[in-house]
Image (tube, coloured by chain):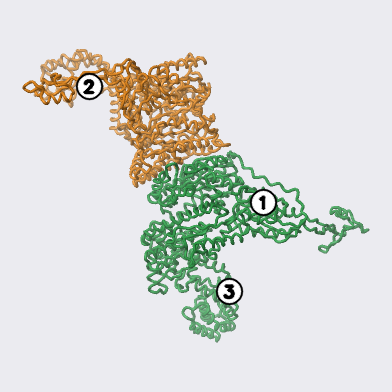
Chain colours: A orange, B green
Amino acid sequence: MATVVTMQEALLALTTYWTERGAMIVQPFNTEVGAGTYNPATILRVLGPEPWRVAYVEPSVRPDDARYGENPNRLQTHTQFQVILKPDPGDPQEIYLGSLRALGIDIDAHDIRFVEDNWASPALGAWGLGWEVWLDGLEITQFTYFQQAGGKNLDPVSVEITYGIERIMMALQRVDHFKNIAYAPGISYGEAFGQAEYEMSRYYLDDADVATNWRLFEDYEAEAKRCIAERLPVPAHGFVLKCSHVFNVLDSRGAISTTERANAFGRMRALARQVTGLWSERREELGYPLGQVEPAPAAATPSTYPEITEPATLLFELGTEELPHAEVRRTAETVREALVGKLADTRLTHGEVRTYATPRRVVATVEAVAPNEADAERTVRGPRVSAAFDADGNPTKAAQGFARGQGVDPATLTRVEQGGVEYVAAVRTDVGRPASQVLSEVLGSIVAELRADKNMRWNDPQLSFTRPIRWLLALLGDVAVPVAVSALASGRTTRVRRTAEEPVVTVDSADGYLDFLRAHEIMASPAERRERIVAQASALAAEVGGRVDFEGEAALLEEIVNLVEYPVSIRGSFSADYLDLPAQILTTVMRKHQRYLPVRDAEGTLLPHFVAVADGACDHELVRAGNEAVLRARYEDAAFFWRADLEVSPEQHRAGLAKLAFENRLGSMAERADRIAHVATELGRRVSLAPDEAATLTRAGELTKFDLASQMVVELTSLAGTMAREYARRAGETEAVAQALYDMELPRTAGGPLPETKPGALLALADRLDLLAGLFAVGANPTGSSDPFALRRAALGVVSVLRDRPDLAPVTVEAGLASAAERIRAQGVEVPEQALAEAREFVVRRYEQQLLDTGNEYTHVQAVLPLAGTPARADEALRELARRTSDPAFADVVTALQRVRRIVPADVAGHYDPAALTEPEELGLHQELGKVREALSGDYALAEFTDAAGALVGPINAFFDAVLVMAEDPAVRAARLGLLASIRDLAGPVLDWDEL
Amino acid sequence: MATVVTMQEALLALTTYWTERGAMIVQPFNTEVGAGTYNPATILRVLGPEPWRVAYVEPSVRPDDARYGENPNRLQTHTQFQVILKPDPGDPQEIYLGSLRALGIDIDAHDIRFVEDNWASPALGAWGLGWEVWLDGLEITQFTYFQQAGGKNLDPVSVEITYGIERIMMALQRVDHFKNIAYAPGISYGEAFGQAEYEMSRYYLDDADVATNWRLFEDYEAEAKRCIAERLPVPAHGFVLKCSHVFNVLDSRGAISTTERANAFGRMRALARQVTGLWSERREELGYPLGQVEPAPAAATPSTYPEITEPATLLFELGTEELPHAEVRRTAETVREALVGKLADTRLTHGEVRTYATPRRVVATVEAVAPNEADAERTVRGPRVSAAFDADGNPTKAAQGFARGQGVDPATLTRVEQGGVEYVAAVRTDVGRPASQVLSEVLGSIVAELRADKNMRWNDPQLSFTRPIRWLLALLGDVAVPVAVSALASGRTTRVRRTAEEPVVTVDSADGYLDFLRAHEIMASPAERRERIVAQASALAAEVGGRVDFEGEAALLEEIVNLVEYPVSIRGSFSADYLDLPAQILTTVMRKHQRYLPVRDAEGTLLPHFVAVADGACDHELVRAGNEAVLRARYEDAAFFWRADLEVSPEQHRAGLAKLAFENRLGSMAERADRIAHVATELGRRVSLAPDEAATLTRAGELTKFDLASQMVVELTSLAGTMAREYARRAGETEAVAQALYDMELPRTAGGPLPETKPGALLALADRLDLLAGLFAVGANPTGSSDPFALRRAALGVVSVLRDRPDLAPVTVEAGLASAAERIRAQGVEVPEQALAEAREFVVRRYEQQLLDTGNEYTHVQAVLPLAGTPARADEALRELARRTSDPAFADVVTALQRVRRIVPADVAGHYDPAALTEPEELGLHQELGKVREALSGDYALAEFTDAAGALVGPINAFFDAVLVMAEDPAVRAARLGLLASIRDLAGPVLDWDEL
């Protein structure tokens, strides 16, 4: 193993390693790129059929990560080492692990893992499936099977390996700030690049001129278009990269509003797709100068099948590269169902079918598989009897030919009737096939048909699955079952741990395979892994007086179980100082980023410990130290933001919103916050607010969304609201104000928690109403799948809050949008009434969908939609409808009202001259209507109305029986119609009766 | 020795080599750079006192070199490998040679040379001295001692080593097109980068949008300024590089006129200087994070000097890195003179002083140096005699003290007189110092004072010379003479060939040193080297039936003699096909680029052979092959242009001038050519042209400057005119037209050949007159040392042509400028009369300077200047003046005319009423004036006038003796003054008489 001490030695070691594996070395691209992927040596070369194997260093510029060199882990330029293997060599993970050894990493001692991480760049129409590679919990490499680029399927698929060099060096050298990396003998990273890091940060964060950079964007785009028109994808690509870089610069300056972002992305996407398309065309025109990758040859179809004589156990193992954790259980289930189903279609008898799965394998066992299929009789229909025998009753030529064809004596032909016609028939015996042949077909088809949620291609010419399938093991007892599917042929070996001395081992027998695997440090059973984790983690937590809340962490536990083949729990600690940070930050990082189990005391309070679960034997001290360092770095990041943010008051943060663009016509985030505060106050006037609530609303309004300007929220957007509450508390605001600021960001997701407080709910509504009114006003309505401002979520939020809070009923969707529109107009932006109507309709449609999705009857939903402006009321009506749906009295009311509604034209107003009424039935109805109207409260809803309207059913029916509505006398006719219209209008507000 | 096969292995080998020598490795810069020098890792890091040792690959973008990938040797992006050693390690050449070994180059077998090549970027205020390194005649590396950057002296000095990787690979792999370089195993350079090469060429040459790129220039400049204002040199430098790149793009598009170029350069220079200044300041403010380089310690001053007893030979050798060839002889001479002069100032007797020099050493020998200086007596003045003796004649205390101080007995005091005062004096004997001590001082001071035309600094703290002085050898007989100067101490070793097994050898004795050196393959004597070259080259040429024109190649031979320490002549050949190219191209390439001696047949016609002179023993076959390949590549380049150009007719080339910008107000080069043709025709009308001359002028006018659009001239500007003649001939133009097109570019330099033909001369004049009139019109006059359009040379050209051709006398400078102005005005450009006057004055000043520079008397020059508009006439007058300058009759004429001129006010017109004249003397003068006027031809010049005017001397003198000019009668006075003014006017055109 080479001794790699400095960062430049590491780069040299990787360069040498990959050179020795046939990679061509190219130079970093000579314009700023955000990642090695964008170097044409990747993004263009992965297209088309030509082979390509390349490695290069790519200093990747991320203006957004600029931190003046102060943050220990963030750099505006970090160093990637990028590798492309095209085609997939079949064992890219193994080759990759060799490169880690070349870097001097003892992969036997460390915990190296492939953790699901997919990659997509909608801007490039590019995506791939793969992993982030963990070194003791630290993400050191992105490993991707590149599936599409420029919207085109890649064939062959490329393997993309991207090393994050600074991270690797910090881990290898055990330093806690990138500046302390030993870059070269005697010179640190900070000494070499510190000044550039500071100055480029200054430019990206503070000094880049916004107007100039926009102009550069335009000019680059124009040049890119020109190059595309001239069919020059190479220079065009360079200009797309330049567009992208200045866009990133503008973004880090906070100068890009959401509409500008969407617009710029659209433009860059269009260019990128043209570039990739053009490159593909040009390569084809050039006749593919590097040749074309030959697809892997198909495995030979088995020609002989071994015989067995006794029932035996079937062992079938499907070996994969690391499956996404959610696919582990699902794949085991899929395989089990397929096996059961397909075996049922055969005549092979068998015992119990079981499947197990780890990230790297699905193991199926079938007990007592019979040596052969049972024989079976089969009746084959021949010619009609009428044509089968001549006048003498002897078989005709037709019958003879049929019998010969079926290999039977004509004398043995029987008869069958079908569709009233009688035919001759031959009875044949199908001799059962050997089990090995049956299983060969069954297992082959299972592999061929296996699919997951998201599927990918690798070097196999036909298979498609969530991750590459690399080997098949099929044994019936101790006999190998030959399975051939696409390029894969089964064998009698399995692959155990990659670091094992012999990673490929022969399996003698299907029986006892789980024990066999266990002996190789693989637990095939998830349940067994789960038990082990629970036992280990509980013991480790207990050692420090803590416990793990396995119930609360059920989802995380399930994930961990499926991230390892052999769980090895290791307890790590972090500085208790970090416990000053809000617990939500700490646990979010542990769970989401690191998959660590938090350790708590008996009261559930976090302790400064965690349990990490490594995969297989490793050097515990080393792995612990590594994981602790990763967590420390992440917490240090968070603490850095936390401390920096606390030095700024909420008011100052709030003032900082002026620098954040929202939408170019709707102004800055500060203007938006002002509008929200105003609208919330305005809506507050409509509902009854206690004096303290009013004060809370006022104060929270003044601070609305201030945390968007905090570093923590800029970094971790999902903490918006959470941080507002934390920072507000620490700034001495009342708990009510802090909570209102938290509440206003709720709900975060459909079905998520809703605001607890009335001021919070009002702010939440105002927030979303402003978004809807504003963006519909400027024509930024969602279209198709494009919803950059998440207006669907905003609309759902409005509905959810209003449904949750009948006390806010005076705030209707219409009134709320109108109030929001008023503030926007005050800012000089035109808000057409049509736009508001569309916004309302948009909200109503979301509500409708929500009601349908939760199982309400379609007709009921339609019936209450007229009330959708006040969802709480509509909900009430819906409940009432559901209650009364089998009540005959209600049915009578409905029938009567529908009768009324059918006859009254829509344009007839609901008033009439009672003097024109003469018939007793109409007078009776008139009087009863008066009574009902009087009985109703000022704010009647469905229940009250229905109860009262019961009295009208008789008179209405009597009226229709006796009175001719369409009288010849116009005055009489008008009065009769007016009477019915009045009933219609009285019923109107509570329901759309026609829909029932 | 490593086996380097592919280009990527070569890059890896260099990276490894320099890493092992303590260099830090950085990445190429992530914006387009024209050379590795501009990467901040060089251009900023060479500033200030911090140490820095770095190596990196730099793909260098030169839009101008774009050739669509067709030219075998030109690429729009070529790969540099750049090394900076700061401070100079003292042996950078030796370390560098080690890197060639690491590349697998057998430096014992190849001919490796350091050939003077200095570097300057006025745009960056940067320059350095150094070499191009030759591998068998191929330039593979630029090696520079960086002296200034940003206009600041660099201290310490950095060594900059820039490898041209493609060239090296083409040589090592023996391929003749860059596309055929094996880049990586199984993939060629063309396969890897061919498409990019083509497409980027398309962009740079054809498709880059001019307006957009100009806008980018402006925007980048604005961002650079903003960064400078914010004191951020790093991003500012990035923007300067971006400016530079788009400038290069515009340039390769032919979109930059000369004024725009000067303007853009000025702006970039200003930015670059601010950036380097700011970087220096910032590093100082940061406290020099990398520390400060300590200067090399001074050598210990000798404390003891060896004694010798017999006269002995002095050997002194001053060892250097390769001197520029012109400095070899000069330094030997300088050292000889210094040695002779300084020894003369001592009392050391010695024999003959001889010096010899090679590129790496100056050897001085002095015969028979005495062991010691002779003793000398010295009289020291003491007190006045009056104060030295008391009344008794005894020495006073003063005298006693003086005697004691001088170490003599008071009784031995003598007396001396000084300024009339008598003093006592002591006579002392200065004992001669040992020769070794005397020589130590003399030799030390010679080294310390040694200077060349251009001097540089290296790692020595005090010395300064044309190249580093690395060792001193000083022996007196077999005794070492200790010399210490700055950090250098002499020894008794010398350095022989760098590839010798022992490159440092001990020298036993001063005697026989030339033989000693010869035994080590070093010929110290230039004469000996010259003889050897002549003998070898003659023999080699004779073998192929040819000869070398040593007389014609005297300058080249002298250069070659001083490029080697041990000449080894090797004959090479080239394909006879290239002989189709004009011989001037072939010999220019041989002489100027390669220092090869051309081989000719008895008639002087070129043969397809050359003699290259290698330095020292080498593998002749290898070296021959290498040199042949270099010449072939250069000829292939030329042939490539030649063939491409011949496919285009002169008319088409001429039309192509429309695409070449000249000056943004004066239009394209096509417009300029049109103007030149018109003006030449117009001027032609003023002189007598034979019909065939007129036809030639017309046709040549139509094709004027067409070759500027040819690839050959774009590439080798110095061939303008030469190629016009060649291409015109081949296109079937008459020889006269071809010659006129050649002539019109003459003279190329001051004193160079002039047009042979009248049409050519007229075109040459029109060319330069258009330049002068046009650029003065738009205010682009030369200022100070800035003369971007070479107007000084143009003015000298006008003068030279007109002086050479009295037959063109009707074409005066004034008339020519007026004619040129007319054409320019026709184009809509304003040409102020004032500008034309200034242009005329500018031409006259050049003429005046030329006359003075060639030794003419100041007064004569001033006297003929009124004729400067017609330089041929002025020349004639000047010759006449010189002839008559000692002729008393001429003196009388001058005196008489000056007398006349003194009395006549300038505003008196030269006419009078003869009737008002009454006195005989005035009437006599009047009559004589009439006769003289009648005798003169219509076009009289100085000689004719002087001869005729002799007759006026008597009458003029008589007039003044007898007549009072200022008569009281106004009419009389007017007539007398008019008479004299008439004489003044008659004399006026031939000379400015007052100046004599």
Mark 3 belongs to which amino acid? Leu
Badges 3 and 2, same chain: no
Q: CA distance from mark 1 to mark 2?
A: 111 Å
Front in this rendered view, residue B785 or A887: B785
Where is mark 2, residue-wise? Answer: A992
User: Which quarter of the image is occupied by the N terminus of chain B?
Assistant: top right
Badges 3 and 1, same chain: yes
Placement of B65 over or under A720, stated as above or below: below
Which chain letter matches label 1?
B
Placement of B290 over or under A807, stated as above or below: below
State the SS at label 3: loop
> Which dot marks residue B959?
none
For the residues bearing labels 3 and 2, Cβ distance under 8 angstroms: no
Placement of B566 over or under A830, stated as above or below: below
Q: Give how far across and how far down residue B312 sits, in percent.
A: 74, 57
Where is mark 1, residue-wise? Answer: B472
Front in this rendered view, residue A396 or A77: A396
Left or right: A152 in relation to A58? left
Which chain letter matches label 2?
A
Badges 1 and 2, same chain: no
Q: Which mark's residue is nearer the viewer, 3 or 1?
A: 1
Mark 1 belongs to which amino acid? Leu
Q: Give how far across and how far down residue B577 sits, in percent.
A: 42, 59
Where is mark 3, residue-wise? Answer: B996
Q: Which mark's residue is nearer the viewer, 1 or 2?
A: 1
Q: CA distance from mark 3 to mark 2?
A: 122 Å
Mark 2 belongs to which amino acid? Asp
Front in this rendered view, residue A37 or B977: A37
